[in-house]
Amino acid sequence: MSARTPILWKWKIPCKIKIFLWLALQGRLLCKVYRAKWRPEATTDCVLCGTAPETIEHLFTNCPFSIRVGFTLAAATGIACSFQNLDEMWEAMAGGQGQGDGQAQARFKRIVIPAGMWAIWRVRNERIFKNQPVYFENLWEDLMSLL
C-alpha cells in the first residue's frame, strides 16, 4: 500500500480527501470493527445497511448503500464506480497514469471516486455522531457539491 502514497499526493483533490484516502488505503479509518478493539461492547454492524460488520472494505465496496451510490455515480458520469474490493477501486483511480486520450478520463476518475467515498464517509459519520437518518438524497446533494 505504501507504494501508492506518492501518486495520491499529486492528485488535484482537496487535502482532507487525500488524507482520508490515504487512511482508507492503509486500513486505518476508524470503522466500527476497528473501534471495537477499544470498545468491545459496541456493535460492529454497518450503520448504512445493518447487514454486515462495518469494515473499510464493506463500507466502500460491499455495502448495499455504497453499491447504490456507485451505480448512481456510474449513470451520471459514465465511470464505473462499483468495485469488488479496495485494490480494484485503487486501480480504477490510479490507472491511466500514462499519456493518451484516456488521461482526461483517468483524472476525472481521481475526482469522482474519491468524492463518492468521502460522501459515503460523511453520511456514515452523521448517522453515528449526530444520529441523523441515512437518506440517499442527502448524500447525493453532498456529492454534487464536491464535484
Image (cartoon, rainbow, N blue to C red):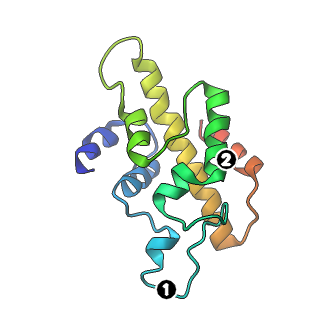
On the image, the x and y values in percent for residue 99 come to 31, 16
Q: Which mark is residue 39?
A: 1
The three-letter amino acid code for the residue at tag 1 is Arg
Give the percent coordinates (x, y) of residue 69.
Answer: 64, 43
Q: Looking at the picture, does residue 138 appear above or below residue 28?
A: above
Which residue occupies the extreme top position in the image? 101
Identify the mark at residue 7; answer none if there is no mark: none
Q: Hey, which quadrant is residue 104 in on the image? A: top left
- The residue that label 2 is drawn on is 142
User: Residue 28 or 16: which is nearer the viewer?
Assistant: 28
Bin the neighbour count of mark 1 within 10 Å (Cα to Cα): few under 14, some 14-19, many 20 and up. Answer: few
Regarding mark 2 in the picture, which secondary structure is present there?
A: helix
Residue at (45% x, 34% y) in the render: 110
Q: Is residue 57 left or right of residue 94?
A: right
Quarter of the picture holding the C terminus: top right
Question: Residue shown at 72%/72% (left/top)?
Answer: 131
Q: Please, is residue 111 above or below residue 120 in the view?
A: above
Q: Which residue is drawn at the image coordinates 60% and 71% (left, top)? A: 45
Residue beneath the point at 64% across and 37% down: 71
**Image depth: mark 2 or mark 1 in front:** 1
Q: Earlier in the sequence, mark 2 or mark 1?
A: 1
* Quarter of the view holding residue 96: top left
Residue 76 rendering spot, x and y as whole percentages: 67, 28
Residue 43 at x, y percent in the picture: 59, 79
